[in-house]
Image (cartoon, rainbow, N blue to C red):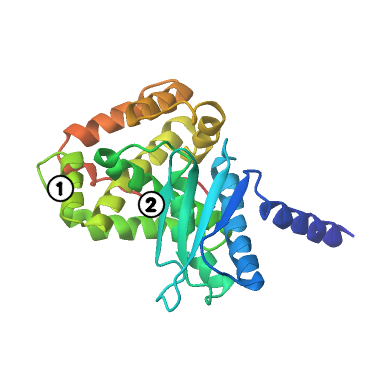
Amino acid sequence: MVLLSFIFSSLLSLSAMDEPLTSIEWHWEDEFSAAEKEKVEEWLYRVSAATESTIGAYPFTMHFYIHRRNGASEPVPWASTRRYPIQGVDFHIDPSYSLESFLDDWTAPHEISHLSIPYLGRAEAWFAEGFASYMQYQIMQRLGIYSRQEVGDRYWNKIESVRPYFERDLDFVSVSRELQRKNNYPAMYWGGASYFMHMNQQLMAEHKLEFTSLLKEYLLCCRLKDDSLEELIDSWDSLLGEPLFRSMLHSYRNDPASGVLEADFLLQAED
């Protein structure tokens, strides 16, 4: 009886995770069969539900624009966000791939997580892309694609791969913008992600608080009022009750890039 109860509750949990609270509006930009639409909807419902479970429901309707790209070398060869007047994502997909292949792909967690913070402008792309790069693996962990240890290992490997680009006396943000001008986006993205790895470590060490837990509060109170990086940082610090995010941002803007990436980025929380 206990086993049956456990199985039943587990099924309910899985079912609930497949139905996000955030409203989604679908835009089929090309022709898709009924079976292809069903697969795409299942994929994006699951990712949206995992995103909600990780950082909370979004206070707006998400618009998903689905484009066909036959013969692609991966399920989602390209995607990008739409920010104003609506909040949405354009997904360019090859629908011949399996549902499992779509779920194993990082693109949807990355792009959907972008929508949880305001558009920050090209000058602050290092921060916005770093945020989405950090969040994609948090969401994939919630999907069951990776364990917490595997996520920690991926963070570590990504940082090690981009560290040589930041062995500079120039401040971190300036180096990131230089990488952006040279179209070295992977280095810019994962360099920026280090900010959130640092912050999660600091939040856990000083407040026993996961960064994702703070985001849940942020979506409830402040997502629709902030329009810039400065306002975003002020909101996070206000929720925390001290200027921790501002202090870290000051270091990234002023300290040598080489020193910023010296810390250990292993996750602090238990599995």
The answer to whether any part of residue 101 appears in the image is yes
Task: Give the residue displayed 17% in from the left and 56% down from the top.
Answer: 164
How many residues crowd around disc 2 within 10 Å: few (fewer than 14), some, or many (20 or more)? many
Instruction: Give the mark nearer the N terminus: 2 vs 1.
Output: 2
- Residue flagged by tag 2: what amino acid is it? Ser
Along the line of sight, the residue nearer the viewer: 135 or 177: 177
- Residue flagged by tag 1: what amino acid is it? Glu
Query: Where residue 223 appears, x then y in whole percent?
Result: 49, 31
Q: Is residue 127 above or below residue 217?
A: below
* Residue that carries the numbered disc 2 in the rendered image: 133
Query: Where residue 183 appears, x then y in whole percent?
Result: 20, 56
The quarter of the image holding the N terminus is bottom right
The tally of labels here is: 2
Q: Secondary structure at mark 2?
A: helix
Task: Give the residue displayed 52% in from the left and 75% down from the top.
Answer: 97
Task: Give the residue displayed 59% in from the left and 54% down from the top.
Answer: 26
From the viewer's perspective, tell me whether residue 32 is left or right of residue 150: right
How many residues crowd around disc 1 within 10 Å: few (fewer than 14), some, or many (20 or more)? few
Along the line of sight, the residue nearer the viewer: 207 or 75: 75
Q: Secondary structure at mark 1?
A: helix
Along the line of sight, the residue nearer the viewer: 30 or 136: 30
Query: Where residue 131 appears, x then y in whole percent?
Result: 38, 45
Task: Give the residue displayed 80% in from the left and 57% down from the top.
Answer: 6
Q: Do tag 2 and tag 1 residues touch (Cβ < 8 Å)?
A: no
- Res 178 label: 1
Q: Quadrant of residue 153?
A: bottom left
Of all residues, the one furthest to the left in this rendering is: 169
The answer to whether any part of residue 136 appears in the image is no
Give the distance between the C-alpha atoms of the residues marked 2 and 1, in whole angstroms: 19 Å
Between label 2 and label 1, give the one nearer the viewer. 1
From the viewer's perspective, tell me whether residue 167 is left or right of residue 55: left
Along the line of sight, the residue nearer the viewer: 17 or 261: 17
